[in-house]
């Protein structure tokens, strides 16, 4: 009887130790009688019984229970509120290039749901083309100084227009002068006239070189043979070659074309006051050969008849000279 009681006591002691060990294991990972191991795969976890590890061999048989749980993030939800981006670039080279690039972006609220992908948001403003444009303009100014002169002339025209508008409320004392005082007279008509002339300076009132003042498109001079030719835009719209002597006197004239056949209309059509009458001012471009660019105004009445012409601006490569009688 004594040996039987001793054996029963040993069995109960062994059972108590086993239960205690299981409870201790459960306290560490939450599973009673199981052991948690991690493999090299970061997305996997292995649970097995304490006495039967997962690595199967002759010493350790296959486990009673095998659990492989792969964990991954299936969805990412992003909420973006009040996103604002402002970019503004204002570039100007003389009066030849005026560029204003602006981006004003405002997002009140954006909700993104991303599933099984990675995403990146990029806001990129590319201004390389603008840099190339400005560089080309500066390079052209270096190669063709006349472009810089043209830009300065445009600035002078703009200044003169400001003086004309300012002179509406007083007496204009000169082309570049301001208001010299006096009592405003016929202000309404003057304002209407200035508004009709809003496209720019009237070359008939403000000529700023000999060629433009005399409607000369271009000049051919032969000083060895005493032969000179001025190609002129006549007031009728005809293109005329004038032969001159060394003193600038016209010896003969020959019509060689007309504005509507030999010039290109660039689409500009505004209403102006010409010699006291309301007419349409049509803008034509004359490019008879490479290197010469002449912009002219053709004034047409309501019946479509040409009532006047005026060369407005010229641009050409190289030098030139003109013979005149004054």
Image: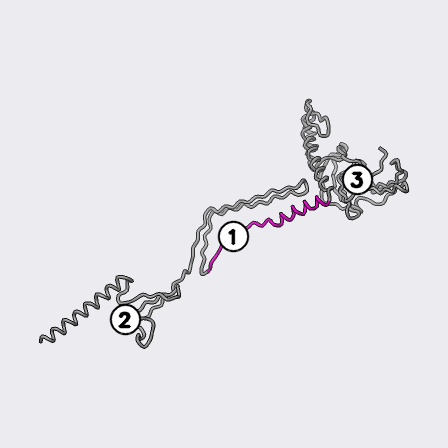
Distance of label 2 from label 3 (alpha carbons)? 111 Å
On whether residue 134 falls in the magenta region, the answer is yes
State the mark number for residue 281. none
On whether residue 275 falls in the magenta region, the answer is no
Vertical position of residue 185 compared to residue 324: above or below:
above
Distance of label 2 from label 1 (alpha carbons)? 54 Å
In front of the other: 301 or 235: 235
Name the residue carrying label 3.
Answer: 306
Q: Are marks 1 and 3 in contact (CB under 8 Å)?
A: no
Name the residue rendered at 33%, 66% in the picture.
37
- The quarter of the rendered structure image containing the C terminus is top right
Q: Are marks 2 and 1 in contact (CB under 8 Å)?
A: no
Mark positioned earlier in the residue sequence (1 or 3): 1
Q: Is residue 287 left or right of residue 158?
A: right
Q: Which residues are magenta?
A: 117-143
Helix, strand or loop under label 3: strand
Mark positioned earlier in the residue sequence (2 or 3): 2
**Residue at the limit of the structure toward the left, as seen here:** 1
Q: Nearer the viewer, mark 2 or mark 3?
A: 2
State the mark number for residue 51. 2
């Amino acid at each position: 009887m004594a040996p039987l009681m001793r054996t029963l006591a040993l069995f109960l002691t062994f059972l108590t130790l086993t239960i205690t060990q299981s409870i201790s294991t459960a306290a560490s990972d939450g599973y009673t009688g199981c052991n948690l191991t991690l493999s090299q795969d970061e997305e996997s976890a292995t649970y097995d019984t304490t006495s039967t590890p997962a690595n199967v061999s002759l010493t350790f048989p296959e486990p009673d229970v095998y659990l492989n749980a792969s964990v991954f993030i299936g969805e990412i939800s992003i909420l973006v509120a009040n996103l604002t981006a402002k970019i503004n670039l204002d570039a100007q080279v003389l009066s030849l290039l005026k560029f204003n690039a602006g981006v004003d972006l405002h997002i009140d609220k954006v909700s993104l749901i991303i599933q099984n992908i990675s995403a990146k948001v990029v806001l990129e403003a590319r201004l390389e083309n603008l840099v190339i444009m400005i560089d080309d303009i500066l390079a052209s100014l270096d190669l063709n100084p006349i472009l810089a002169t043209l830009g300065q002339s445009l600035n002078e025209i703009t200044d003169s227009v400001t003086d004309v508008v300012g002179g509406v409320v007083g007496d204009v004392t000169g082309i570049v002068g301001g208001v010299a005082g006096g009592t405003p007279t016929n202000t309404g008509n003057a304002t209407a006239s200035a508004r009709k002339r809003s496209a720019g300076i009237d070359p008939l009132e403000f000529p700023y070189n000999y060629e433009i003042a005399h409607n000369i498109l271009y000049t051919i001079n032969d000083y060895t043979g005493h032969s000179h030719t001025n190609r002129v835009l006549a007031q009728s719209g005809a293109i005329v070659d004038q032969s001159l002597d060394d003193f600038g006197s016209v010896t003969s004239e020959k019509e060689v074309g007309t504005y509507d056949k030999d010039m290109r209309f660039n689409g500009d059509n505004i209403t102006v006051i010409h010699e006291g009458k309301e007419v349409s001012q049509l803008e034509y471009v004359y490019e008879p050969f490479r290197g010469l660019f002449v912009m002219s105004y053709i004034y047409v009445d309501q019946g479509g008849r040409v009532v006047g012409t005026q060369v407005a601006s010229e641009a050409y490569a190289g030098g030139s000279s003109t013979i005149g009688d004054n």
